[in-house]
Image (spheres, grey):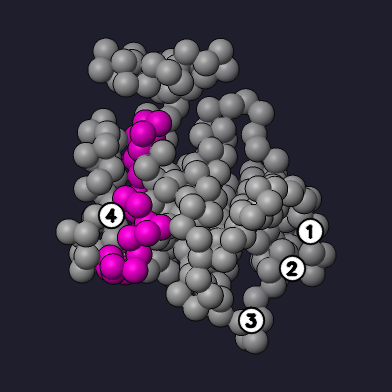
Amino acid sequence: MNALPLSDQAFDRYSRQIMLPDWGEQAQKQLTNAKVLVVGCGGLGTAASLYLAGAGIGQLVLADDDKVERSNLPRQIAYRDTDIGEGKAKALATQLMALNPLVSPRAVERRLSGKVLTLEISLADIVLDCSDNMETRQAVNQACVASNTPLIAGAAIGWSGQLMVFDFADNATPCYHCLFPETSDTPVRNCQSAGVVGPVVGIMGNLQALETLKYLTQSEKPLTRFYQFDGKSLSLRAMTIPRETECLVCQAQQQEVFDENLAQ
């Protein structure tokens, strides 16, 4: 069944992107019907969510168990001084509704894990990992691999940023664990412990939003890649992610699928 045409209000709001020859009304409808899960509502998540809401993503699920602190404000630009002490997910949902009343953000005020994480990822068209800890990143990656849900992960620290794109619709795609194997002695480095330049976080979050919009609207999907950003030199280096032949996540998932097919 064909989707309903865009309303006059929506057409006017999104007119500058609709006029693109490789976008049009059909791509805008795809965004209206899309569901994006944003894991982490800090600097990356706020920057990405603002542009995704502005572009017209119909459903944005915002997951974070943290509260807004004064030290967040220089880089987590969706929040205001009056939001200090409020839950980030709820405060961000309020800001997105104020930006674009045509979208439907849903706040999940808890750290996603276990069955809840699996469920939320299985319901999403694409997932943005905007978290700041290795445990969450590995869990999100594993759930995305298991459900073949595309994953766009971002990170920022100091003057540097990272962007990782994984299209798990392709069974040969490597995963986050291939790139960063989880070990017990992995050092904990985040904005709180090592510092960060605010605009670097915004740049990486905006790149996550850009890759998301490309994935949802363009016939040619973004390539699975690892991008390294240097804020001082303004350089962005792209690298192919090698697939680890003994990866405990994506190789194990591929073997499980193979065994299921064999059993049939």
State left or right for residue 130 relative to residue 6: right
N-terminal-most mark, 2 or 3:
3
Residue 217 place in picture, x, y as percent: 53, 27
Residue in the image at 76% along x and 55% along y: 241
Q: Nearer the viewer, residue 26 or 84?
A: 84
| Residue holding disc 1 | 243
Magenta residue check for 18: no
Q: Quadrant of residue 154?
A: bottom right
| Label 3 packing within 10 angstroms: few (<14), some (14-19), many (20+) | few
The answer to whether residue 221 shows anywhere in this view is yes
Q: Which mark is residue 186?
A: 3
N-terminal-most mark, 2 or 4:
4
Q: Nearer the viewer, residue 32 or 49?
A: 49
Amino acid type assigned to the residue bearing label 3 in the image: Thr
N-terminal-most mark, 1 or 3:
3
Residue 228 place in picture, x, y as percent: 68, 54
Amino acid type assigned to the residue bearing label 4 in the image: Tyr
| Residue holding disc 4 | 79
| Label 4 packing within 10 angstroms: few (<14), some (14-19), many (20+) | many
Amino acid type assigned to the residue bearing label 2 in the image: Cys
The answer to whether residue 164 shows anywhere in this view is no
| Label 1 packing within 10 angstroms: few (<14), some (14-19), many (20+) | some
Marks 4 & 1, CB-CB < 8 Å contact:
no
Residue extent of the magenta highlight: 52-79
Rounded to the nearest angstrom, the CA distance separating label 2 from label 4 is 39 Å
Q: Quadrant of residue 29?
A: top left
Secondary structure beneath disc 1? loop
Residue in the image at 79% along x and 64% along y: 244
Residue with the most extreme bottom position: 185
N-terminal-most mark, 3 or 4:
4
